[in-house]
Image (cartoon, grey):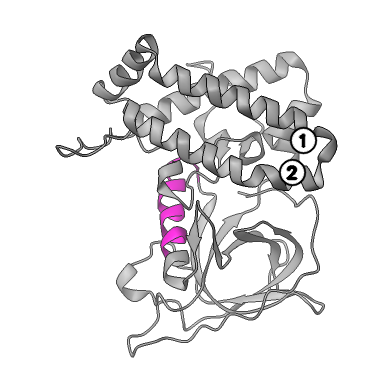
Amino acid sequence: MIVTRSPRKASSRTLKPLAAVCSNNAPLEGASQRTYYIIDSVQYSETTLLLFTARRDTKEQRVVIKILRNYKDTRFNLETAAQRLQCQLTALELNAKLTNQVYIGIAPIYSTELSQKPRQIVLGKIIKHPNVSSLDPAIEYALLMHELPKERQLDYLLRKETPDALLGHLRGLCIYIGHKHKELNPLPACDKGEICWGSCKQLEEKLEHNLAFFEEVLPLWKCTQSASYERLERIFRRASKILREVLHQPRYRKYFEQRMRKGCIKCCHGDLKAAHTWILPYDLDPQTGDIPPHRIQILDAVDFNPNYN
């Protein structure tokens, strides 16, 4: 099966080669094998590199390789290789609960070359079920995924398909998400004196954290998008006021608390986006009339900050 979309644009920036040297005498899992991947295109973000590649020995096998970058702000801390490895391991574990055979595993990075052609990355053996004790937290690991067809990406379908077809897609997607939510275990009860996940107090803290971050980046918008800055600022001020009021109104607070008491708060997808959702070609299930679950793929189910999941 095939994982993430082709990038909107590529960049000519160069990622420095990443050393893969063990810091102890224990054998590094996956160190005995090297595989070369030819890089077709690169998608950059603040925190990640997405490399759209094909194996050099079997060019038909398309693989997307995700590398975390050295990055830190008020939301994320990815400054050390150990922190980046932990995020990759968590991503591999949690994404497997929402996807079907898309995430392949992790692999140690031996080298990358983005400035010369052919651009390539060299990885060690793919580790499908990582054992933390056999990994070296001092080196970099990549997360590997199969590439999914862009024409089945939800944001593409929203632009191209008819309203009737979209209604069927979205109905199936909602049913799928509901089933996944029911399959997951509720979060464990919080200790006495601890702020419970999903409680009004926790939601208030998370809201203030998000508003503070937006307040911090809002001036940057003024520099780059001055024409729309005033409108954006008005929307932000109004939304901030409304959201704070909602969390303090008893008629809403009772629903938040009820949701928590009934065990409806679970560790699910923290950032659902059309760009991270695929609906593959399907025939409706003759018994349920729904889209078969394995035809829906939702990626990026984990955030680098667990408070955002």
**Image coords of residue 280 (percent x, y):** 64, 35
Nearest the camera: 302 or 197? 197
**Image coords of residue 2 (percent x, y):** 63, 49
Q: Residues within 10 Å of mark 1 (few under 14, many from 20)?
A: some
* Residue 103 seen in the current view: yes
Q: Residue 155, relative to residue 303: is it above or below?
A: above
Q: Amino acid at mark 1?
A: Tyr
Q: Residue at x 49, y 21 (%)?
A: 175
**In the figure, residue 163 lies in which quadrant?**
top right
Task: Kindly identify which numbered label has been placed on residue 229.
Answer: 1
The secondary structure type at the circle numbered 2 is helix
Q: For residue 96: magenta?
A: yes
* Residue 291 seen in the current view: no
> Label 2: which residue?
221
Q: Quadrant of the C terminus?
A: top left
**Image coords of residue 153 (percent x, y):** 69, 37
Q: Residue at x 31, y 35 (%)?
A: 197
Q: Amino acid at mark 2?
A: Trp
- Numbered range of the magenta stretch: 86-100
Q: Earlier in the sequence, mark 2 or mark 1?
A: 2
Nearest the camera: 223 or 295? 223
**In the figure, residue 154 lies in which quadrant?**
top right
Nearest the camera: 18 or 190? 190
Q: Residue at x 17, y 38 (%)?
A: 193
Check the image and name the residue furthest to the left. Answer: 192
Check the image and name the residue furthest to the top. Answer: 251
Q: Residues within 10 Å of mark 2 (few under 14, many from 20)?
A: some
